[in-house]
Image (spheres, rainbow, N blue to C red):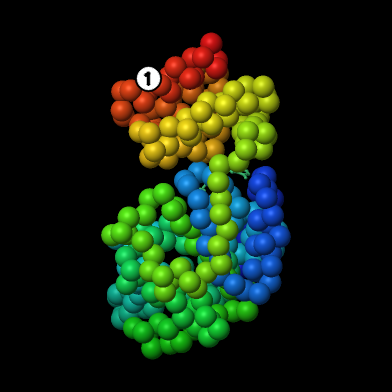
Amino acid sequence: MSMQEQYHITEEPFYQPTGNEVTLYEAAYQQRLPVMLKGPTGCGKTRFVEYMAWKLQKPLISVACNEDMTASDLVGRFLLEKDGTRWQDGPLTVSSRIGAICYLDEVVEARQDTTVVIHPLTDHRRVLPLDKKGELVHAHPDFQLVISYNPGYQSLMKDLKQSTKQRFTALDFEYPDENTETSIVSKESGLDVEQSKKLVQIGHRARNLKGHGLDEGISTRLLVYAANLIQAGIEPIEASKMAMVRPVTDDPDIRATLNNAVEMIFG
Ligand SMILES: Nc1ncnc2c1ncn2[C@@H]1O[C@H](COP(=O)(O)OP(=O)(O)O)[C@@H](O)[C@H]1O
Ligand SMILES: [Mg+2]
C-alpha cells in the first residue's frame, strides 16, 4: 500500500452539516488556504475534517497535540540504528511530501516553539525547513494545513500567538440546534428519534449551566455515548447519568441539577 493510499478515507464518514461550512471549506481548499476549526470539544470538528478529506479525495494525517510535543515530533528526527543513523519524517513532513491534509488537533496544547514550525508552510512559500537534516521540503500542491482550537480553554498563559492565528482562515463550530442534533444522535447510534430527542433536550438544558458551574456544555459526543448505552440495553436514566452527568462535573450541586433534568425528561 502506498503512503497516499494508507491515509485515504475510503468510506464516507457521516457528517451532518450545520451551515455552509462545506462550501466554505471547499473554497479554502481550492485556494490551499490554511483553516482553523474553532469550537468546544465534541461538536464535530474532527468528523468534519474526515468528511472533507473523503469528499475531496485527499489523504488525511491527524496529530493530537500535547504540551510535551516538540517540533521534532511534527517534523521528524534522526533515529539511531546498528549501522548509523536514519532520518524519519514526522507527520507534518509526510503530509507536505505526499499532499495530505494535515490536521493538528488542539494545537494550542503544543508549546509556542513547536507551533512556529508550521509558519513557513502557511504563507506563499509553502515550505518546511528540516534544519537538522539540512533539507527544505517544498509542499506538494495538494497539501493543506488544518488546526482545531477550543476558544473556551484559552488562558493568557496558553493561547495561540496572533502571528499564528493570522495565518489561518477560520470556521466556527457550535453544538447544533435541537433538530439537527437529534438527527445526528439518532443516525450515529441507531437509537429512535423520540429517545434521541430526549437526550438532546437534556444536553440543551445542561448547556444553560455553562458559566454557572459547568465549564463546558455536554458535548454531542457524550449524547451519542448515552444513546450507545441505551442501544446496549441500559435504562435511559442510568445511561444518561453515566455518559452525560458523571464525566462533566464532580460538583454535587451541579450533579443534582443534571440528575433532576435526566429524571424529569425520562421519568
Ligand atoms: N455534525 C455532525 N455530524 C455527524 N456527527 C457529529 C456531528 N457533530 C458531532 N458528531 C458526533 O459527535 C462525535 C464527536 O465529534 P468530533 O468530531 O470528534 O468532535 P470534536 O473534534 O469537535 O471534539 C462524533 O464522533 C460524532 O458521533
Ligand atoms: Mg477532535
**x%, y% of residue 113?**
32, 72
Q: Is residue 233 above or below residue 204?
A: above
Residue plotted at (42% across, 83% down): 129
Which of the 4 image quarters holds residue 200? top right
Residue under label 1: 256
Q: Is residue 111 left or right of residue 126?
A: left
Q: Residue furthest top?
A: 267
Q: Is residue 111 above or below residue 139?
A: above
Q: Name the foreground residue: 17 vs 10.
A: 17
Which of the 4 image quarters holds residue 131? bottom left
**x%, y% of residue 74?**
41, 69
Residue plotted at (49% across, 62% down): 147
Residue plotted at (42% across, 37% down): 210
Q: Is residue 51 left or right of residue 252?
A: right
**x%, y% of residue 69?**
33, 63
Is residue 238 something one can see in this rendering? no
Residue plotted at (68% across, 50% down): 19
**Circle 1 Cα neighbour tier, 10 Å, few/some/many (<14 / 14–19 / ≥20):** few
Does the Cβ of the disc 1 residue fall within 8 Å of ligand 1? no
Q: Is residue 69 above or below residue 88?
A: above
Q: Quarter of the image for the N terminus: give it.
A: bottom right
Is residue 30 something one can see in this rendering? yes
Q: Secondary structure at mark 1?
A: helix
Total number of numbered discs in the rendering:
1
**x%, y% of residue 31?**
66, 74
What amino acid is labelled 1 in the image? Answer: Ala
